[in-house]
Amino acid sequence: MELKLILARKQGRLKSRNRRIRPIKQSKRTEVWYRERLNSVIDEMSQVIIAELENPTLNDATSTPPLSITAKLSRAIQKVASMSIAELATRLSLGLVNRANQQNKDRLLKTYKNAFDIDLSGLLSDEAIRDDMARAVKENVDLIKSIQTDFINDIGEKVFSNLAGGGRHENLVSLIKERGNISKSRAKFIARDQTAKLNAALNESRHRSLGLDLYEWGGAGDERERESHLKLNGKLCKYSDPTVYSDDGGKTWKKRKSIGAYEGAPGTDFQCRCVSLPYISWD
C-alpha cells in the first residue's frame, strides 16, 4: 500500500500538499564494525609474513645468505596467498548487509513514526530490498578478496625491492607493517563507501515500495563537496530518473547535464556524503 493511502485513511484527508522528511542516514556503527573486521584480516596477513621473518633461523649474521631470506619471504607470501578467504569474505559481507539493513529499517520506521505517527513495520518486508542486499554481498566479497590480492602484490613489490637494495631484517618488518597500514587506509575507504552506497540503495528501494519517487537533494555543505553535487543541493529529484532535476517544485524537469550536475542518487558516488530527503506530494 502506498504511503499516501495510509495517511489518507489515518487522517481522513490529506492535510498538507507537500511534505519533506528527515533523511535516513547510514549507520556509523555498521561502518566501524566493517572497518574493524577488514583491519583484522589485514593484521592476520601481516602477521603471517612477520612471523616468518622473526623465525630464529633468520638473522642478520653474515653467514646467513640473503637468498635464504628471500626464499623464506617467498614462502610467507605463498602462505598468505593460500589463505582461504572466500568463506570469511562471505561472512563479513553478510554481516555488513544485515547490519546495514536493520539499521536502515529501524531508522526509517522511527522517522515516519515521528513525522506522521504511523507504524510502517508491517509494510517494510525485505522483499523490496532483496536484490540490493544480494548485489551488495557479491560486491563486498569481491572487494575483500581484492584486499588480499592487492596486499600480496604490494608486499611483493615493496619488500622484495627493499631486499634487492640490501634491506635488513628490522627494516623489512617495519616495511611490512607500513604496507599493512596502507591496506588499512583502503579498508577504511571501502567501509565508508560501501556503507553509504548500501544505505542509498536501501533508501531508494524502500521509498519506492511505499510509492515515493521524489526527494530533495541534501548536500554536505562544506568545502569538500563536489561541484557536480553542490549544484543539486535543494533541488527536487526523482529516484526513477537520476538524470533530471526540478527547481520549481516538480512542475518542470530539466536535464542535470545542462548544469553539469551528477547523474545518480545521493550516496552512490564514491565517498558521497549527500543524502536524500523524501518528498511526499499529494498531487
Image (spheres, helix red, strand yellow):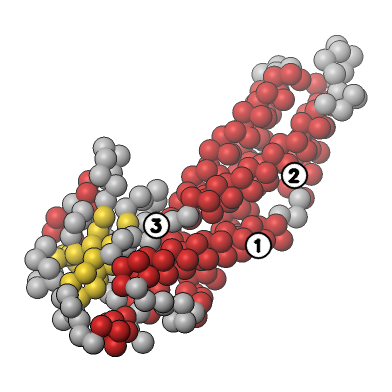
Which is nearer the eye, 28 or 71? Answer: 28
Give coordinates of residue 210: x percent, y percent: 35, 79
Q: CA distance from mark 1 to mark 3?
A: 25 Å
Res 5 seen here: no
Which is nearer the eye, 79 or 132? Answer: 132
Q: Quadrant of the N terminus?
A: bottom left
The disc, 2 or 1, on the residue closer to the chain's N-terminal end is 2
Q: Which residue is mark 3?
A: 25
Residue 78 placement: quadrant: top right
Describe the element under mark 3 as helix, strand or loop: loop
Q: Amino acid at mark 1?
A: Thr
Which is nearer the eye, 231 or 10? Answer: 10
Q: Which residue is mark 1?
A: 90
The label on residue 80 is 2
Is 282 above or below relative to 214?
below
Q: Residue at x 62, y 28 (%)?
A: 178
Label 3: few (<14), some (14–19) or many (≥20) C-alpha neighbours in 10 Å: many
Q: Residue at x 20, y 85 (%)?
A: 13
Describe the element under mark 1 as helix, strand or loop: helix
The disc, 2 or 3, on the residue closer to the chain's N-terminal end is 3
Q: Is residue 73 left or right of residue 267?
A: right
Q: CA distance from mark 2 to mark 3?
A: 37 Å
Give coordinates of residue 80: x percent, y percent: 75, 44
Q: Amino acid at mark 2?
A: Val
Q: Quadrant of the C terminus?
A: bottom left
Q: Amino acid at mark 3?
A: Lys
Q: Residue at x 82, y 15 (%)?
A: 60
Q: Residue at x 13, y 59 (%)?
A: 258
Q: CA distance from mark 2 to mark 1?
A: 18 Å
